[in-house]
Image (cartoon, grey):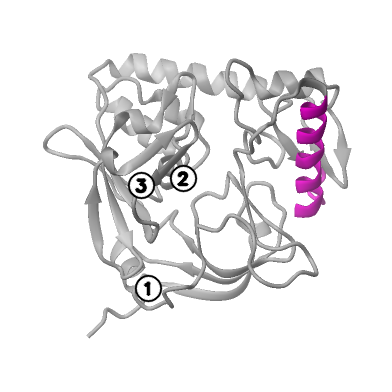
Amino acid sequence: MPEPIRGELREHESMADHVSWRAGGAVARAFFPVDMADLAAFLGSVRYDEPLLLVGLGSNLLVRDGGFDGTAIFTHGALNTLRREPDGSFYAEAGVASPKLARFAGKQGCAEAEFLAGIPGTVGGALTMNAGCHGGETWRYVEKVLMLKRSGEQVVRGPEDFAIGYRHAGLKSVTDEIFAAAWFRFPPGDAEAARERMKELLERRVATQPLQLPNAGSVFRNPPGDHAARLIETAGLKGTQMGGAQVSEKHANFIVNREGEATASAIEMLIGRIQAEVAEKFGVALVREVRIVGVHSGQSGQHGEGV
């Protein structure tokens, strides 16, 4: 007999309550698993063609105002196992917050995990987009990953199975698997030095980023040899507003929902304006780092970058 599903399944769940931009439409269904086994059982029960959207802390995601006609799966709080393995590696499930992994590795006397403290998302999101900052990148420290197939079956894969690049990591041969966990290995270091480094990085974030306002982190990837924030600021766009969405006056590669009233459409339109003006002034095509899924208000069907 198949495993019973123990998690909570909701219908028409507003994503404005679950993404850091505090804006956007609803998903048709939202599943909150209890643990890895529960998620595997759920995956085995859904239609093979059901659009799925994996959500961690919602710090890099926007659901259009017309919603997402599929199922969002919330990993944070469910896939939360974090441990040190006997061989010295670190096992972290997809719902573990990246800063939590950074602190855990640092306390265990490891170096170079500190950059993860500056990534406001989960391990699953960090794996998907090869998240990085301050000179560190997620996949540099990945030994292997645990994937879940749409059937619910688990499979362990190595980095060689993935096409890994700047802010991207995807399977080379199949597309029906999701990140469930990963094993990381960091070089030996000093716990006190790691703590001081994380403190320094946090102070730098507070000083340079609009953390007190709803935002989704860096909106655009940095183009080769340049910084998106510099191009946006030089284009005179810092502080520009559209329908409640604003280019941050503190960091030009952030868009903030200053009064909490911006729609997903306003945010997306501001993103488009930034891209158009930077392309016109500098001939540089800025590539989004944030994911946008779903349909515009009034549309039907499924569009966007679903997972």
Q: Regarding mark 3 in the picture, which secondary structure is present there?
A: loop
Circle 2 residues within 10 Å: few <14, some 14–19, many ≥20: many
Q: CA distance from mark 1 to mark 2?
A: 20 Å
Q: Using the rendered image of the protein, determine whether residue 263 is visible from the camera's viewpoint.
A: no
Residue at 72% x, 18% y is 230
Q: Is residue 300 above or below residue 121?
A: below
Is 272 in the magenta?
Answer: yes
The region drawn magenta spans: 259-280
Of the two numbered discs 3 and 1 in the rendering, the one whose residue sits closer to the viewer: 3
Q: Is residue 255 left or right of residue 76?
A: right
**Residue carrying label 1:** 42
Closer to the camera in the image, 270 or 33: 270
**Residue carrying label 3:** 172
Query: Quick one: which residue is furthest to the bottom in this view?
Result: 1
Residue at 40% x, 41% y is 127
Q: CA distance from mark 3 to mark 2?
A: 18 Å
Q: Position of residue 183 (x, y in %)?
A: 25, 40
**Residue carrying label 2:** 125
Q: Regarding mark 2 in the picture, which secondary structure is present there?
A: helix
Q: Is residue 225 above or below residue 287?
A: above
Q: Is residue 257 left or right of residue 225?
A: right
